[in-house]
């Protein structure tokens, strides 16, 4: 029962698939190259004899040879019109464009001839509308010529997919909303209400571009323009005729590929003559709408699919041939009898595909196996296939190859799974649709629900997330920190169209960072508090006790230890706490640093001189960190200089051209020891002097702070003594420079 139901559903699916193909073929015109040759052959049979009262005045090679090269002066065209008008035709049509003005006397001469004739029709052209991607506009002839003619109309043509002209638009709506009739439609209206049959009137109102029969070249009565100008044509030849003037010379380029024979070129004026006769006779071929074509094409398809259910392969093939011939014959009869074109190509295409597609029933067992194994194949691999086996049976060889590919793919998947299972982090791989395709054991342990096909959002919803940090880390309710890494930009991800996401447990790292910050706070407090207490006690003992030497030594050691603790904490915080950049007044920064060290310098009888330039004085940086940089440099200078020394602090714009502000701190002290001069900013380096010991934390802080500010610090120690530190920091340009650059 299940097998029968599956077979029924498969046949219904086949019918629906062919129906969709049929719809695409009809609506998309896929079979025009099949339908058009049949249409051309039938159209040729429907063409009536050329009308005797339609005469073409041909601008042929002989005319060009006798009269001159084209374009002729419009006075010459005017003379041609005069000669024709003198023979009293019903109508004169000029299939010539006069859109460009000529000399005034030339345009006037032509206009005079047209007005004198009184029964002239001139041509206009359709060109793309300016400033629009769609729509057309009318390219009018010269105004004086338009006003002289009785009427005008466009001469545009429509080509099919094979570049063959089979239809002409009777009425075209321009981009400005106006309706422009075809030149031949305008000509018949000029002849009077009785010139058009009801069928033509109906088609004109509908604005269609019907199919019409086109006769081979040179079937209409034709006379050379040069013969008209010479007066060699008798008046009776043109009397009461409809005269079309146009180019037939091959060199003028007014030739078009037309049916019925699909390879014949005729002149544009002959196309106009064919359309004129079709409009007069009402002999058009109407095209069936897509709905009717779909309905008629679906009937033979339904019959064939029904036959494939019940008939043997042999009888099904005979049914296919019979239905295809019946479809073509029916289309032919409908066209010849009722003038309605029902293209049979789409139906024939659907019938031709239905039979081979229906043969799958004979391979049901093999098809079931292939489908079952194909569902297990997650991706196509490029493994070299084994040599053919299983004898000469093609199906057996294909099954063997597929079985090999499945085993190879399974092995690769197992290998890949083993690799990602060995990873210490949770890994999830999503396809281009956002569905989970692969994950490791760590992901299974991490997520409450994890299965193939689940989306990333659904997967994350199973996590007990308490908050999300600014860095994109997830903090779970149990305190764990997860770092989410998105590997979409890698080459393998781009090539496979996949999205690889790694969930890394960084709880230990974040805990260690928190402990380190806490330890810094503890050290900052516990190391400073005893030293502050010692300094407070010794400040009172200095007065109460008489042993000021010992007290001074204790106080100096306490101060040194306090400074060491401060330097250590500040250096550690520099790596932990991000800098806060702002606009800083460099001059004020220097003055404040000098003021803070003034009292210490005064105690040692050291003079500090400061000087700053006017511009630029604004730098970008962290004011607190930069203040400590200057404090460390000035403190060292005061500490290591002997009494009576001088310290110079200068801020200048020497590096303004490079966008830098320089701060120079120089002293005339003993300078750095030779061993320390190679790298004065090295942490835990050589001791400073015999009297003062240090570990280099303060200078290490200075170097790191300047580096974080994208600056530079240089140290000079001349052999004659003294030390000069030059700090270069990024500066903002002066206000005048800013205004000039805007």
Image (cartoon, rainbow, N blue to C red):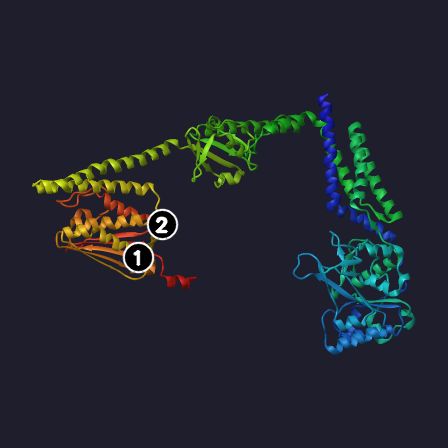
Compared across the picture, whether 213 is left or right of 459 comes to right
Mark toward the viewer: 1 or 2: 2
Neighbour tally class for label 2: few under 14, some 14-19, many 20 plus, Cα within 10 Å: few
Which percent across, then down, holds residue 395?
66, 28
Label 2 sits on residue = 581
Residue 677 in view (yes/no): no
Upstream in sequence: badge 1 or badge 2 = 2
Q: Residue at x 59, y 27 (%)?
A: 403
Q: Secondary structure at mark 2?
A: loop
Compared across the picture, whether 319 is left or right of 6 comes to right
Label 1 sits on residue = 661
Q: Secondary structure at mark 1?
A: strand
Q: Do callouts 1 and 2 mark residues in contact (Cβ within 8 Å)? A: no
Q: Residue at x 71, y 30 (%)?
A: 360
Which percent across, then down, holds residue 596?
22, 51
Gap between marks 1 and 2, in whole Å?
16 Å
Quarter in which the N terminus is drawn: top right
Residue 201 in view (yes/no): yes
Neighbour tally class for label 1: few under 14, some 14-19, many 20 plus, Cα within 10 Å: many
State which quadrant residue 549 falls in.
top left
Residue at the far right in the pictured view:
236
Which percent across, then down, holds residue 64?
77, 71
Q: Is residue 419 above or below residue 272?
A: above
Compared across the picture, whether 100 is left or right of 645 comes to right
Compared across the picture, whether 585 is left or right of 172 comes to left
Quarter in which the C terminus is drawn: bottom left
Depth check: 106 or 373 in front? 106
Q: Is residue 322 above or below residue 710?
A: above
Using the image, tell me which numbered label, if any, was put on residue 320.
none
Depth check: 590 or 442 in front? 590
Residue at the far front in the pictured view:
544
Which percent across, then down, holds residue 486?
47, 38
């Amino acid at each position: 029962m299940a097998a029968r139901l599956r077979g029924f559903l498969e046949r219904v699916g086949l019918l629906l698939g062919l129906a969709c193909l049929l719809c695409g073929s009809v609506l998309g015109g896929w079979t025009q190259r099949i339908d058009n040759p049949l249409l051309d052959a039938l159209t040729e049979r429907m063409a009536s004899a050329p009308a005797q009262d339609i005469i073409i005045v041909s601008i042929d090679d002989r005319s060009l040879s006798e009269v001159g090269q084209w374009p002729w002066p419009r006075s010459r065209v005017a003379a041609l019109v005069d000669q024709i008008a003198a023979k009293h035709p019903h109508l004169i049509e000029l299939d010539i464009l006069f859109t460009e003005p000529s000399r005034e006397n030339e345009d006037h001469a032509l206009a005079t001839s047209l007005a004198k004739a009184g029964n002239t029709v001139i041509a206009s052209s359709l060109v793309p509308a300016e400033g629009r991607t769609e729509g057309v506009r009318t390219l009018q002839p010269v105004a004086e010529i338009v006003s002289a003619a009785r009427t005008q109309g466009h001469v545009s043509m429509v080509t099919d997919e094979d570049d063959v002209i089979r239809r002409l638009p009777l009425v075209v709506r321009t981009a400005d909303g106006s309706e422009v009739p075809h030149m031949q439609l305008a000509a018949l209206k000029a002849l009077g209400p009785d010139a058009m049959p009801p069928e033509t009137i109906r088609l004109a109102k509908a604005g269609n571009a019907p199919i019409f029969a086109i006769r081979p070249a040179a079937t209409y009565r034709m006379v050379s323009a040069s013969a008209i100008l010479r007066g060699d044509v008798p008046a009776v030849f043109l009397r009461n005729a409809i005269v079309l003037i146009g180019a037939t010379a091959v060199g003028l380029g007014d030739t078009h590929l037309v049916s019925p024979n699909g390879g014949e070129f005729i002149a544009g004026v002959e196309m106009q003559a064919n359309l004129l006769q079709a409009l007069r006779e009402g002999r058009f071929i109407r095209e069936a709408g897509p709905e009717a074509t779909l309905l008629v094409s679906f009937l033979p398809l339904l019959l064939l699919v029904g036959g494939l259910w019940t008939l043997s392969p042999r009888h099904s093939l005979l049914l296919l041939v019979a239905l295809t011939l019946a479809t073509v014959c029916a289309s032919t009869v409908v066209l010849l009898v009722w003038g309605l074109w029902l293209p049979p190509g789409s139906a024939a295409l659907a019938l031709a595909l239905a039979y081979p597609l229906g043969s799958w029933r004979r391979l049901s067992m093999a098809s079931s196996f292939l489908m079952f194994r194909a569902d297990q194949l997650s991706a196509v691999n490029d493994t070299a296939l084994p040599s053919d086996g299983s004898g000469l049976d093609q199906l057996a060889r294909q099954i063997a190859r597929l079985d090999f590919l499945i085993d190879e793919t399974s092995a690769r998947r197992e290998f890949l799974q083993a690799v990602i299972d060995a990873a210490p982090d949770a890994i999830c791989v999503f396809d281009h649709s956002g569905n989970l395709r692969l994950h490791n054991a760590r992901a299974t342990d991490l997520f409450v629900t994890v299965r193939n096909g689940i989306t990333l959002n659904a997967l994350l919803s199973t996590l007990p997330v308490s908050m999300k940090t600014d860095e994109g880390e997830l903090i779970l309710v149990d305190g764990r920190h997860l770092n989410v890494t998105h590997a979409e930009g890698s080459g393998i991800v781009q090539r496979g169209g996949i999205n690889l996401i790694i969930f890394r447990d960084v709880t230990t790292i974040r805990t260690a960072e928190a402990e380190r910050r806490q330890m810094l706070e503890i050290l900052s407090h516990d190391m400073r508090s005893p030293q502050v207490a010692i300094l407070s006690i010794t400040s009172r003992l200095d007065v109460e006790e008489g042993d000021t030497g010992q007290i001074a030594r204790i106080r100096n050691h306490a101060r040194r230890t306090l400074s060491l603790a401060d330097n250590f904490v500040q250096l550690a915080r520099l790596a932990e706490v991000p800098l806060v950049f702002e606009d800083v007044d460099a001059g004020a920064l220097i003055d404040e640093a000098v003021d803070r060290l003034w009292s210490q310098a005064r105690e040692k009888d050291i003079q500090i001189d400061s000087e700053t330039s006017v511009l630029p004085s604004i730098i970008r940086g962290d004011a607190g960190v930069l203040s400590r940089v200057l404090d460390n440099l000035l403190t060292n200078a005061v500490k290591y200089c002997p009494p009576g020394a001088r310290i110079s602090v200068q801020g200048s714009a020497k590096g303004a051209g490079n966008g830098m502000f320089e701060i120079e701190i120089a002293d005339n002290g003993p300078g750095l020891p030779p061993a320390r001069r190679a790298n004065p900013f090295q942490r835990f380096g050589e001791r400073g002097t015999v009297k003062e010991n240090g570990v280099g934390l303060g200078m290490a802080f200075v170097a790191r702070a300047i580096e974080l500010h994208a600056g530079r610090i240089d140290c000079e120690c001349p052999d004659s003594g003294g030390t000069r530190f030059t700090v270069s920091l990024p500066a903002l340009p002066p206000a005048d420079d800013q205004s000039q650059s805007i």
